[in-house]
């Protein structure tokens, strides 16, 4: 019998440390007391993205009311009032923000527009992520069944190609094309070092989500781990692989537990292992936790790390599609990309193309943060403008502030100004304007943000995370950071500013991999839209919004120039 | 099938599998490099060898770019020159300005590239590394990682030429550094002191310890010779200054061994000028060794050998002798002395 209500208790590490288990026991006991056990389900769910002070929290569906911070003593009141009598207990609701949930829902608009168009997050926050039965009850593994029993691998690839779905890791490479290349690559390429297994292909899930401000993959895994597993199974079937690896960010302890449980359950249900659904398709998934390096999110560095080597990017070509794990053809895809595959197979490419824009179909999961009233994860169709995101989902800019700039795509993304507010955001539109969608982080900054300070914070990250392999990135990020620090402290000159721009330009041209090229983006786009502010720091030695300390004196360094000769 | 490509407007032919850098060099086009070495696997890390290729985006490292039919390559456009100057300038922001006392002066590839592109050393106020100089206490390789440009040629030479895997890269970004083993001493990390890392180092970061302060490249004359230590017959160059051998450098064109040498060949030359070295044969007369001439010594040996034949005689040959010499030894033993009792000190 379906339950009329669901209580989902935050199961993140903080909540668990604050004895969320006891709260669940208390709910169970109270529901039993009122004989509601058959009508109301209680389960742990992922991180609800409630502020830490409000944890542990619980969300009660179908109303979507969030309670917190809770103790076991609050359970009797919530059960007797809300679930027995149907009255929301306002006194116990999360106070600061109405819906600072992991998944921002817009109840008033449900059925009207965006909120109904969830593809990747369709189940997250609604099902119990630790229950494969819940997943199956919500159409889970039907796409895998359809693929294995009704479709050939080539048809699966074609369906994904037709859907036009692009990789959600940041670069936006068409997933179907990638699978097609791997599917058509002859697997018998022994690795030059002779250490590979040879004759096999791999599915690799890039879950090393290390872009600051991006946590969509974690919440997808924590909220709906089976969708990722099903996506891996579908791509494994499509390319002819028998094994898959999930390279998980090391800090994602909860996600790892969820995945391990999900994999064990899938094994128990015959959805992983030998002869899945009675077909000839067999598949295994292994989890590998990273050790905390941003560079390992770059797919070739990730593969190096997975092989037990130092996480440094490889020379490309060859690309992982032909030379991946231990030299074998490998389909590397982001978590969100993989979670897109089951709905595409289940409902078809034509359905998928009804979402989003013509060039970039589908939805995009954004992590929204910064100076908006509601932060968290949202899923909206491709092509939704930044203005809509801020006003509808973000609840507007924080009181007393005005929009100044946004950064799309995490630290590696472009800093954009108000002229971008009405651009339909997808990979193609932003790329055409010199920005990018990246990993899907949307940092919204109000008018009290100093762009020099922002660039400094971002560069500090890149300088820490550069692997150091190539000269432009290793030394370029360090020197750029030093100049930004001087700008913030009124110790820089206009010469420094020129050098900053030169470093960024050269880093973008000359770096070995995307890290160094991306490190230049915040500087170059910051200069493009807010050059006056940089100049004010260097020339007038003023920070208009009084964020930077500006206490120093300019440092003038005399460099003896070599007498130029013809080169 | 030769591949046709155009470099700086000239059509050239290259072999399949060659890189643009190899093709350019084979055709006399100079492209500067630091991390590249013809003996080692390319890594594309220094970004000095970048070129522009029609229909390809940005600047591409020539050392890792395979040639392709119809490729149109430019090696010295203003954009490329500006990038190379930037790379060298960045390297100098974390490099000491002490070429005057540097062991590698005159044989330093960084110095050559900086000279070629006329990049000034900058006295900037940013951070620089200050590692302890000469910290590793091994007998033969002098370490000064302040001069390291992280080209990883030492890492690759140790792994690919010598097969010891002593060197590695630790940390990230600006804090990257070359370490032996897990940041222990070279000897603890299993170093055999072959000196390949120093031979492949393009700067003064790793240099030969025994020859420190005894002269620099332009002060030496080089004499090609064959190593006396074993039968392999490695070739290398004695570096001679004022009539004395002060250093050994290995050479790529050495037929047998290329740049590879063992610790004896590279560093075991001290005996040559040692006062205790025997330069004339000694004959024991009345219980004492007495200097004699080669004629006298050889006559004595021949006379003694003539007194024996057959199995009362046995011959023990030396691993220090070449294969050809050992062949002659056994031939002499069998054909002249009439016995098969011949053995060799390396037969353990």
Image (spheres, coloured by chain):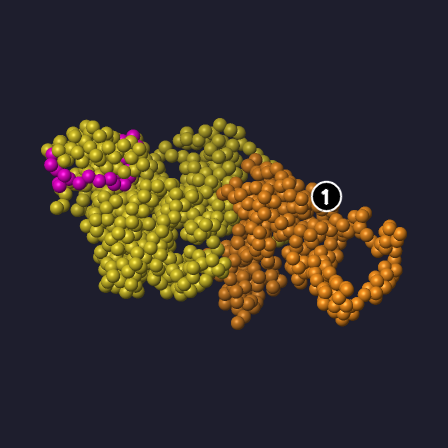
Label 1: state its secondary structure.
loop
Q: Nearer the viewer, residue B266 or A323?
A: B266
Q: Is residue A556 above or below residue B274?
A: above
Q: Can the viewer see residue B219 in this picture?
A: no
Segment colored magenta = A34-55
Chain letter for orange? Answer: B
Residue B9 placement: quadrant: bottom right
Q: Tell me the crowding category of disc 1: few under 14, some 14 to 19, or many 20 or more residues within 10 angstroms, Cα based.
A: few
Image side of residue B333 versus residue A492, left or right: right
Q: Which is more toward the observer, A266 or B320? A: B320
Q: Report x, y in % for residue B259.
A: 64, 56
Q: Is residue A290 left or right of residue A470?
A: left
* Residue projecting furthest to the front: B312
- Residue at numbered disc 1: B213
Percent of width and height locating residue A512: 49, 51
- Who's yellow, chain-wise? A
Q: Is residue A189 at least partly visible in the picture?
A: yes
Q: Is residue B279 magenta?
A: no
Instruction: Give the camera-side residue of B27 and A294.
Output: A294
Q: Position of residue A246 (x, y in %)?
A: 36, 50
What residue is rendered at 25% in x and 44% in y? Answer: A130
Tell me the quadrant of the picture where the C terminus of chain B can be found. Answer: bottom right
Magenta stretch: includes residue A46:
yes
Relative placement, left or right, of A329 versus A394 is right
At horizontal 83% and vertical 53% (from top left) the residue drawn is B279
Quarter where residue B94 is shown:
top right
């Amino acid at each position: 019998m379906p339950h009329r209500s669901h209580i989902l208790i935050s199961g993140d590490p903080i909540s668990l440390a604050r004895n969320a288990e006891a709260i669940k026991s208390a709910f169970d006991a109270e529901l039993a007391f009122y004989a509601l056990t058959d009508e109301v389900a209680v389960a742990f769910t992922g991180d609800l993205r409630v502020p830490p002070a409000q944890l542990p929290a619980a969300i009660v569906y179908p109303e979507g009311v969030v309670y917190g911070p809770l103790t076991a003593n609050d359970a009797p009141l919530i059960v007797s009032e809300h679930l027995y009598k149907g009255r929301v207990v306002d006194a116990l609701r999360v106070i600061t923000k109405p819906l600072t949930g992991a998944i921002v829902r817009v109840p008033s608009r449900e059925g009207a527009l965006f909120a109904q168009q969830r593809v990747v997050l369709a189940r997250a926050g609604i099902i119990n992520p630790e229950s494969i039965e819940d997943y199956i009850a919500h159409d889970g593994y039907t796409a895998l069944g359809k693929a294995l029993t009704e479709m050939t691998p080539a048809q699966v690839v074609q369906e994904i190609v037709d859907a036009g779905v692009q990789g959600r890791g940041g670069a936006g490479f068409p997933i179907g094309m990638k699978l097609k290349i791997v599917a058509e690559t002859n697997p018998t390429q022994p690795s030059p070092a002779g250490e590979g297994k040879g004759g096999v292909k791999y599915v690799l899930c890039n879950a090393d989500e290390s872009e600051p401000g991006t946590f969509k993959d974690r919440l997808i895994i924590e909220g709906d781990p089976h969708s990722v597993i099903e996506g891996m199974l579908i791509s494994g079937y499509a390319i002819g692989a028998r094994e898959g690896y999930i390279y998980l960010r090391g800090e994602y302890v909860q996600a790892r537990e969820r995945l391990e449980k999900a994999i064990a359950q899938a094994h128990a249900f015959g959805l992983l292992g030998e002869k899945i659904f009675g077909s000839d398709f067999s598949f295994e998934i292994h989890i590998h936790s990273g050790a905390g390096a941003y560079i390992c999110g770059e797919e070739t560095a990730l593969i190096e790390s997975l092989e037990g080597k130092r996480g440094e990017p490889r020379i490309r070509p060859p690309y992982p599609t032909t030379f991946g794990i231990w030299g074998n053809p490998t389909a590397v895809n982001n978590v969100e990309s993989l979670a897109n595959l089951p709905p595409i197979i289940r409902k078809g490419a034509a359905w998928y193309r009804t979402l989003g824009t013509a060039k970039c179909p589908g939805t995009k999961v954004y992590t929204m943060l910064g100076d908006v009233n509601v932060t968290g994860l949202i899923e909206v169709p491709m092509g939704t403008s930044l203005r809509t995101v801020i006003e509808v989902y973000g609840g507007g800019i924080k009181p007393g502030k005005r929009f100044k700039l946004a950064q799309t795509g995490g630290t590696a993304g472009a800093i954009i100004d108000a002229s971008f507010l009405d651009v339909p955001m997808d990979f193609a539109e932003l790329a055409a304007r010199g920005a990018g969608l990246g990993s899907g982080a949307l940092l919204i900054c109000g008018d009290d943000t100093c762009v020099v300070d922002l660039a400094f914070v971002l560069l500090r990250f890149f300088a820490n995370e550069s692997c150091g392999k190539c000269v432009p990135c290793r030394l370029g990020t360090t020197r750029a950071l030093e100049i930004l620090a001087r700008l913030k402290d009124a110790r820089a000159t206009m010469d420094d500013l020129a050098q900053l721009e030169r470093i960024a330009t050269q880093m973008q041209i000359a770096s070995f991999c995307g890290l160094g090229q991306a490190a230049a983006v915040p500087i170059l786009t910051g200069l493009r839209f807010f050059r006056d502010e940089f100049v004010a720091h260097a020339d007038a030695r003023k920070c208009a919004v009084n964020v930077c300390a500006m206490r120093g004196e300019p440092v003038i360094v005399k460099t003896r120039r070599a007498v130029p000769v013809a080169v | 099938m030769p591949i046709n490509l155009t470099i700086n407007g000239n059509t050239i032919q290259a072999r399949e599998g060659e890189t643009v850098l190899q093709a350019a060099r084979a055709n006399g086009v100079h492209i500067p490099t630091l991390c590249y070495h013809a003996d080692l696997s390319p890594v594309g890390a220094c970004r000095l060898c970048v070129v522009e290729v029609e229909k390809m985006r940005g600047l591409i490292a020539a050392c890792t770019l395979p040639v392709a039919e119809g490729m149109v390559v430019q090696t010295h456009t203003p954009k490329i020159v500006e990038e190379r100057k930037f790379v060298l300038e960045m390297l100098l922001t974390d490099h000491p300005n002490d070429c005057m006392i540097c062991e590698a002066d005159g044989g330093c590839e960084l110095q050559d590239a900086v000279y070629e592109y006329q990049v000034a050393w900058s006295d900037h106020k940013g951070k620089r590394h200050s590692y302890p100089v000469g910290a590793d206490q091994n007998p033969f390789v002098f370490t000064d990682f302040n001069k390291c440009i992280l080209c990883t040629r030492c890492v690759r030479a140790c792994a690919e030429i010598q097969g010891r895997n002593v060197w590695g890269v630790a940390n990230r970004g600006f804090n990257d550094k070359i370490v032996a083993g897990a940041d222990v001493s070279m000897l603890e990390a299993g170093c055999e002191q072959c000196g390949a890392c120093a031979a492949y180092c393009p700067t003064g970061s790793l240099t030969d310890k025994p020859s420190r302060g005894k002269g620099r490249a332009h002060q030496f004359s080089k004499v090609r010779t064959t190593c006396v230590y074993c039968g392999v017959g490695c070739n290398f160059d004695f570096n001679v200054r004022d009539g004395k051998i002060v250093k050994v450098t290995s050479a790529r064109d050495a037929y047998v061994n290329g740049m590879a040498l063992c610790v004896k060949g590279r560093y075991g030359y001290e005996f040559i000028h040692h006062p205790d070295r025997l330069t004339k044969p000694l004959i024991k007369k009345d219980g004492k060794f007495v200097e004699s001439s080669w004629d006298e010594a050889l006559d004595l040996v021949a006379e003694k050998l003539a007194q024996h034949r057959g199995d009362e005689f046995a011959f023990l040959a030396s691993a220090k002798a070449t294969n050809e010499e050992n062949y002659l030894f056994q031939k002499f033993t069998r054909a002249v002395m009439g016995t098969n009792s011949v053995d060799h000190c390396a037969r353990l």
